[in-house]
Amino acid sequence: MEVIIRPTREKATTLVARLLLDQIKAKPDSVLGLATGRTMEEVYEKVAAKNPDFSECSSFNLDEYVGLPGTDENSYRYYMNEHLFNKINIKLENTFLPNGVAEDLKLECEEYEREIGKRGGIDLQLLGIGRSGHIGFNEPLSALFSRTREKALTPVTIEQNSSLFDNPEEMPKQAITMGVGTILAAKRIILLATGKEKADIIAKAVEGPITSMISATALQLHQSCVIIVDEEAASELKEKGYYRWIFKNEPEWKKYQDF
């Protein structure tokens, strides 16, 4: 795991966008793991503005609400179409999200895993982090080797996300999510977090013990995981000086100093 601290939210999202664009340039047929959320909107806006060639790419999203069709404005399929897919040249048939209205949700989860495997696995996985420390919707007590499955949402997650619904009471209480094990199987992982409200959970995820109560701590086990945060989100990290030294001195980060 590496931690990159950028001075502002703007610089953090710009760096993530640049890393995603560099992935596509290096491997045009990349299999991408994508995430949703307010911070990711800025990343996708910056990516689309560069008019990249996504024609050979495929993508798999982390999760989807149970009970919402892709046409619902609160579904993650709708989000992805609005914020990224409709703005780039990716083929929609190569963009995958769990089907939250599938008749057989267990079968849907199994088929989602099979489709990821058929495409050779995920090359680059983008992540956000919830206030409870979840990645995807892997809520507390999620098994660290779990795979795509249906998951009940915690009151904290419901409170955090329900504000995005016109009627908060209509927010689904369950979702389909990639498992922690599915995420860890990606070849490379980038987690983005910004803002003071994420400082406590980032410190626990990065510097705390590995525990199923905070699924993001499992990222400590990954061989190629980068945590990108702004100063506010990094404010409770104890080893900030070391993380800054790595970004300034490691050769792989030299070309990103100005982002």
Image (tube, rainbow, N blue to C red):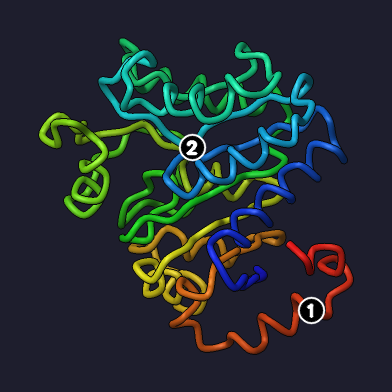
Disc 2 is placed on an element classified as loop
**Whole-percent x and y of residue 137?**
37, 44
User: In this picture, is 241 found above or below 78?
Assistant: below
Residue designated by label 1? 248
Mark 1 burial class by Cα count in 10 Å: few <14, some 14-19, many 20+: some
User: In this picture, is 8 found above or below 65?
Assistant: below
Residue at mark 2 to residue at mark 1: CA–CA distance: 31 Å
- The part of the image, by quadrant, that contains residue 171 is top left
**Whole-percent x and y of residue 163?**
21, 43
42 left or right, relative to 255:
left
The C terminus, quarter of image: bottom right
**Whole-percent x and y of residue 16?**
65, 53
Residue nearer the viewer, 51 or 98:
51
Disc 1 is placed on an element classified as helix
The N terminus, quarter of image: bottom right
Mark 2 or mark 1: name the one nearer the start of the chain: 2
Q: Which amino acid does label 1 sit on?
A: Lys
- The part of the image, by quadrant, that contains residue 88 is top right
82 left or right, relative to 43:
left
* Residue at the extreme left: 169
Residue designated by label 2? 62
- Can you tell which of label 2 and label 1 is closer to the viewer? 1
Q: Which residue is drawn at 42% across and 58% down?
A: 215
Residue nearer the viewer, 31 or 259:
259
Q: Residue at x 36, y 13 (%)?
A: 71
* Residues tagged 2 and 1 counted as in contact (Cβ below 8 A): no
**Whole-percent x and y of residue 194?**
47, 63
Q: Residue at x 45, y 45 (%)?
A: 146
- The part of the image, by quadrant, that contains residue 167 is top left
Residue nearer the viewer, 193 or 180:
193
